[in-house]
Amino acid sequence: MQAWPGDNQRGSGSQRPAKIALYTFLCFSLAGLIAGFALGGFTGRAPGGRSGGTGLATTRTPSIVAHSPNPSATRAPENVLLGVPIVGPGDYTGSEKADGTTTYTFSAQIVNKAGNTPITATDVTCRLWLTEDAGATSAALSDNNYALLRTSSSFDQPFPHETANALNFAPSSPQTQPCSAQGKTSWTYTLAPSLHHGRYFLAVLADWKGAHYNWAIVAISVSKGNNG
């Protein structure tokens, strides 16, 4: 019998489907490998982040934390209650001369009403003046619910019953000045030669913003020139 070409391959013909299946498997594997590389080229891991599945690399946005300022401690409203200014025997001269040259000093310790302790506030105003009538001066300060003392601008004008131009103050110690928060408040002055001899009163006032105030009055005798 004549053999046809390829007839001698009959025994290996059963291997052809297997080879075809192998080729098919290799093709699909290669396609999957190529697809894997392609997919890996579109999905990446952002530094510090997680793998993204959207095809876009993601970055981590730093959180911004707003820190609110700590609320300041609640402070009670300032309220300086003033006691009667303390004027001791050594804080003034009881007998003074109206000669325009002799220098005198008047001092007062401004105190809190509670305990008569020295003030530490720096916004208390002091004023010193001379009067011939202590009673009328006190009445004027108290008049109309202390209206005179509620307006600090009025301190630049002569007070009722004040003996005007009697005290000539040194430039360093004006008639109206901030009360000292460290020690006594002092004035330096001379008595005007035009002042008549007789009994007078030195009045000192402490006023806190027109809300709280107090005053003290001491008596002095005034002589003319060298006749005292």
Image: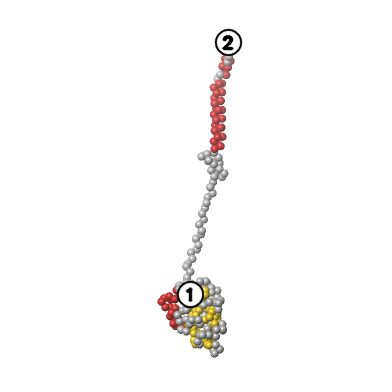
Q: How many numbered marks have been drawn onto this rendered protein structure?
A: 2
Q: CA distance from mark 2 to mark 1?
A: 143 Å
Asked whether residue 90 appears in the rendered view, the answer is no
Q: Residue at x 53, y 88 (%)?
A: 224
Label 1 belongs to which residue? 207
Residue 111, horizontal then vertical, whole percent: 50, 75
Kindly give the residue lying farthest to the top in the view shown. 1
Q: Residue at x 43, y 75 (%)?
A: 147
Using the image, determine if residue 113 lies above or below residue 63.
Answer: below
* Residue sitting nearer the eye, 50 or 185: 185
Residue 92, horizontal then vertical, whole percent: 54, 82
Residue 64, horizontal then vertical, whole percent: 52, 51
Find residue 169 and name its label.
Answer: none
Asked whether residue 143 appears in the rendered view, the answer is yes
Lower position in the chain sequence, tag 2 or tag 1: 2
Quadrant housing residue 146: bottom left
Q: Secondary structure at mark 2?
A: loop
Quarter the C terminus occupies: bottom right
Using the image, determine if residue 205 lies above or below residue 55.
Answer: below
Looking at numbered disc 1 in the image, what kind of residue is underneath it? Asp
Kindly give the residue lying farthest to the bottom in the view shown. 227
* Residue sitting nearer the eye, 174 or 74: 174
* Residue sitting nearer the eye, 52 or 105: 105
Label 2 belongs to which residue? 2
